[in-house]
Image: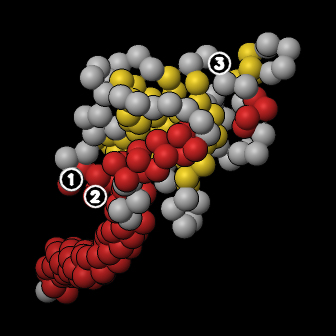
Amino acid sequence: MLKLCMKKYFYILPVISLSVFVSFLVLSKVAYKEEEPLINMDETVGVENTKDKGSTSLANPASVYCEENEGELEIVTNTDGSQIGMCQFENYACEEWVYMNSGCTIEEDAEKIKGALIAKGLDLTDMQVVITKHLGKYIGGGVVPVSAPAGGGYVFAVKDGEGKVDIVADGNGAIMCSLLEDYPDLPLYLVAECIDEAGTIVTR
């Protein structure tokens, strides 16, 4: 009788042990799954916040304004590695921030440049000033015949905070470096090279 009971429990004990072990695994798995979403949620929120913050910081309202007003944004890289964002239109380009802040007054500044050239003694009868690049402080363009807007010469001007315009350089040939000495911040985008007194081409 004793042997029969022991034999009976010999088979029952392993079954009980297996059941306990399986229950332990199930409970452990459930506990692990309860914690897992909390970890993933925190990581996802962190990535989304960083991404959103990065996108906001990279947004350039001047670039957006340019493209929303039918301009084509062009990033110009100077020889020194500096960059300028230009909003390109059919006949002229404006620095993007200048354009957004209503500082790209093409027709008005063209008349001011023409007046400054006339004040230098130039006869501009039947001639007009055409601005092609407006960077706010510095302006580049040409002086061309009214009847045929081609040919003519170049003109570069500087505009102060009060709207007054002075001529930096104008003519048909090479630009002398001496004319640029008073304007060290003249962008390379406008004038990248000049000629020194010895006639040598100088890269600014």
Say which quadrant the N terminus sits in: bottom left
SS of the residue under disc 2? helix
Question: Would you say 67 lies left or right of 175 here?
Answer: left
Q: Residue at x 59, y 36 (%)?
A: 121
Quadrant (top left/top right/bottom left/bottom right) for the C terminus: top right
Using a 10 Å C-alpha cutoff, classify the residue at mark 2 as few (fewer than 14 neighbours), some (14 to 19) or many (20 or more): some
User: Marks 1 and 3: which is nearer the front?
Assistant: 3
Residue beneath the point at 35% across and 28% down? 126
Rendered image quadrant of residue 38: bottom left
User: What residue type is disc 3 on?
Assistant: Ala
The residue to which callout 1 is attached is 69
Residue 18, numbered circle: none
Label 1, label 2: how many angstroms apart (C-alpha)? 6 Å
Q: Where is residue 136 in the image (x, y as percent from the top left)?
A: 49, 54
Q: Do the residues labelled 1 and 3 touch (CB within 8 Å)?
A: no
In the rendered image, the vertical position of residue 126 relative to residue 58, given as above or below = above
Q: Residue at x 32, y 75 (%)?
A: 45
Tell us which disc is closer to us: 3 or 2.
3
Label 1 – label 3 distance at C-alpha: 36 Å
Q: Name the residue tied to disc 2.
A: 65
Secondary structure under tag 3 reads: loop
Residue for point 75% across, 29% down: 177
Residue on which disc 3 sits: 174
Q: Which of 57 and 96 is in front in this view?
A: 96
